[in-house]
Image: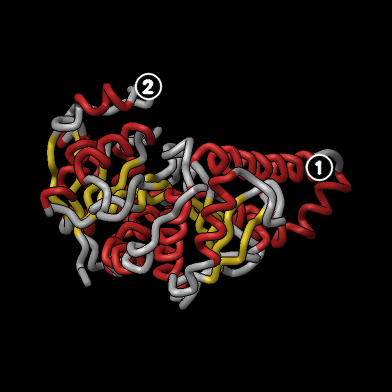
Amino acid sequence: MTTSPRIAIDAMGGDEGVRVMVAGAALARHRHESFKFLLVGDEVQIKAALENHPNLRAASEILHTTEVVTGDDKPSQALRKSRGSSMGLAINAVKSGDAAAAVSAGNTGALMAMAKVALRTMPGIDRPALAALLPTLTDTDVVMLDLGANTECDARNLVQFAVMGAAYSRILYNWEKPRVRLLNIGTEEMKGTDSLRFAAQHLRDSPELHMAFQGFIEADKINRGDCDVVVCDGFSGNIALKSIEGAARFVTDLLRRAFTSSIRSKFGFLVSRPATELLKHHLDPNNHNGAVFLGLNGVIVKSHGSASIEGVANAVKVAARLVEDDITKRIAQDLEQISAKEVIEE
């Protein structure tokens, strides 16, 4: 276990770049004094930002570059920048061992492409998956994957995603056997695509896996807290995620409009403010920030491009936690349980 993880920060990524990325790292350092950082980006801008964070400055090294992967860059364009861009250098620091993990708020497709080429997938994993935490009605978040890295998946991919998601959930909450379900259009066994049904059958027939497979789940139940891991292909997962995020914004905007519609409503807002603040905190994506590319030979965490300082700090915390608990080793151990079995779609 790594007790003092050094985390590479792509300081140039995200909507606001250096200011928020450095401030987020500083907040994470304030909360966890053992954290160390490799700040990758324009040295002039980073040094200026560090003037406000002496505690971070003492625990950081700067790797200078002015080359940036933009939000408009296609993965193929980003790959050509992999040797010189802040994103590429942060990933390569993980590959070389100069950092234990990398955090970027930049272009998701570019980050995945670069990370996959540089770090490669783990033995036994065909494709890496993007996993994130979603809020629930309970005290714990639900792990959901894949959220866009793979638009089409077969049964073998889905089984591997289930293993990786369960390993992630076990690290987060120390579950012995996280409850795992496959996202589907219904809960009946005959529902869904062939890939979903074959994956479900394989998981049912594999009680040795470190999970409690509980069949299918529909999209409207994801946030109920009835399971710990939701598995799906990247196409369905990305749509579900955007729908959940949109519904959360709709609810908060609707409440804001309702509470400002009249004097009486404003008084009602004052009375109910503690409850609405709790709702706002629970739905704030910054409190669940830090999506993870699972299945790579290294830890790469994707922060929201619009993440706040708090959100970046949470993404850094996720990266450190996965390093400390050696997520790659845990996934490798769990994969051994399915290596003797082939997932065959007949």
The mark lying in front, picked from 2 and 1, is 2
Residue found farthest to the bottom = 176
Residue at image mark 2: 72
Q: Position of residue 299 (x, y in %)?
A: 28, 54
The image's colour scheme reads secondary structure
Nearer-the-camera pick, 36 or 230 = 230
Which residue is located at x 79 percent, y 59 percent? 271
Q: Position of residue 227 (x, y in %)?
A: 60, 65
Query: What secondary structure is marked by label 2?
Result: loop
Which residue is located at x 36 percent, y 68 percent? 337
In which quadrant of the rendered image does the N terminus lie?
A: bottom left
Is residue 207 visible from the viewing direction of this image?
A: yes
Quadrant of the rendered image containing residue 306: top left
Give the residue type that dot 2 points to. Asp
Which residue is located at x 21 percent, y 43 percent? 91
Which residue is located at x 63 percent, y 53 percent? 280
Q: Mark 2 and mark 1: span between their CA atoms?
A: 37 Å
Residue 202 tag number: none
When the figure is inspected, residue 77 is found, relative to residue 121, above or below; the finding is above
- 2 or 1: tag closer to the N-terminus: 2
When the figure is inspected, residue 242 is found, relative to residue 210, above or below; the finding is above
Q: How many marks?
A: 2
Q: Position of residue 72 (x, y in %)?
A: 37, 21
Quadrant of the rendered image containing residue 163: bottom left
Residue at image mark 1: 258
| Mark 2 nearby-residue class (10 Å; few <14, some 14–19, many ≥20) | few
Q: Position of residue 114 (x, y in %)?
A: 25, 36
